Amino acid sequence: MKRVLLEKINNKDIIVGVVGLGYVGLPLAVEKAKAGFKTIGFDIQSEKVNMVNEGHNYIGDVVDQDLKELVANGMLSATTDFSFVKDVDFVAICVPTPLDSHQQPDISYVKSSAEKISKYLTRNSMVVLESTTYPGTTEELIKPILEEGSGLKCGEDFYLGFSPERVDPGNLIYKTKNTPKVVGAIGKDATEVIAAMYRAVLDGDVFEASSPAIAEMEKILENTYRNINIGLANEMAMLCDKMNINYWEVVEAASTKPYGFQPFYPGPGLGGHCIPLDPYYLSWKAREYGFHTSMIESSMMINDKMPEYCVERASRILNEHKKSLNGAKVLVLGVAYKQDIDDYRESPALEVIDILKEKKAEVDYYDPFISVYRHNGMRSKGLDELTAEIVASYDLIMITTAHTKVDYQMISQNAKVIFDTKNAMKDMGKRDNIEVL
């Protein structure tokens, strides 16, 4: 099997399948196809499938023309019919792994995908899980499902591994193509072959881990590292507020040290598909071993309470201007979870808006990248534009995303008062109406 697959990889005879055509799956499918491997995308949402087959892009990190050309040339197609798995040699699972209502891992999408794949899995094929999950998922969950559903044996009839996605929406330097990969598979041969498959597609290096569990844990470590350090930044910001110290200047000063320090910044909370979720996966799994991740859980508590803290600060700022939050007109700038993208998954700005409304504030939002969002079953539409008159009509402007496509100079000149949770207005000369987190 190893010899057969390596030869097929070398000759570009591998047919690739990508399950889940979202922020991770579609860019991966496009890169596989661009590298000369015929690729089939699988998704349960017919809308996404139809858009791909029509060459219509809906992911920011995918170049529109690339998608159109690949579809037109027959190198990339999409389907809701999982029976086509029987035609592929390599399957990457790139489905969501959210938290449920009890803040516990929801691996139903991963499990469902594995069950669908198992019905049509063939000999001499590779299956790779890319979805972020807890250590042990590949061997404890995916392997038994694939073996039972297919009647095949892992390591003898097919290879199985884990290669964590590393997608940073909006990153202008690192994309799917040039970001280094980690691969951990069941058995040395599986690791070698799956790594070879990624090397045939990507420019970034491929690190071969000794097991899927190593690869699963390193992904959790990447994002827990950021979670903890952002938690420290948020706690320091809260302390600095009490001490009347500008934390942003503190970080700027500390960043002059050329070793032993990496800057992290506070904000209204954590957003995106990884950093707010991954530590929960780890702490949940740790309890199985009677271990409590005290430092991780502490940072999670700090980060989770930031939206409420920011609303509390907003209320204090309004009070200083003889205005109650109840009935105040508040304009929230930015609902995306990070600057210059249209992704609002787990965005703390949405929770900030919800809390403001609970406190009886009159809330609107403006985001140049997101005209409409859906949250908790509700549809919200943003302002179409920002003018001096519109800005002046609000009691408080609250910046929750530091988009660059915003005229901060105009806002600073016309706003009654501004609460900047992202230090987006750091270059403004006039600062008497600006307060930072």
Image: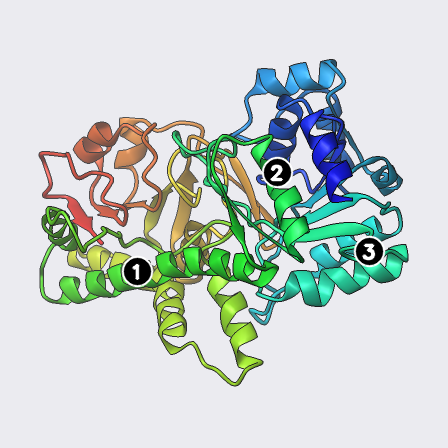
Left or right relative to 67: residue 75: right
Q: Which residue is mark 1?
A: 229
Q: Outermost residue, front direction?
A: 3
Asked which colour scheme the image uses, the reply is rainbow
Distance CA(mark 3)–CA(mark 2): 26 Å
Q: Position of residue 298 (x, y in %)?
A: 36, 73
Q: Which residue is mark 3?
A: 115
Q: Amino acid at mark 2?
A: Ala
Q: Amino acid at mark 3?
A: Glu
Figure check: 179 above or below 280 = above
Which residue occupies the foreground of this view, 160 or 365? 160
Dividing the image into 4 quarters, which one contains the N terminus? top right
Q: Which mark is residue 196?
A: 2
Disc 2 crowd, CA 10 A, few/some/many (<14, 14-19, 20+): some
Query: From the viewer's perspective, is the residue at label 2 or at label 1 nearer?
Result: 2
Q: Secondary structure at mark 3?
A: helix
- Residue 328 appears in view: yes
First of labels 3, 2 by sequence position: 3
Q: Are marks 2 and 1 in contact (CB under 8 Å)?
A: no
Q: Position of residue 216 (x, y in %)?
A: 55, 59
Q: Position of residue 19 (x, y in %)?
A: 72, 42
Dividing the image into 4 quarters, which one contains the C terminus? bottom left
First of labels 1, 3 by sequence position: 3
**Picture quadrant where residue 305 is located:** bottom left
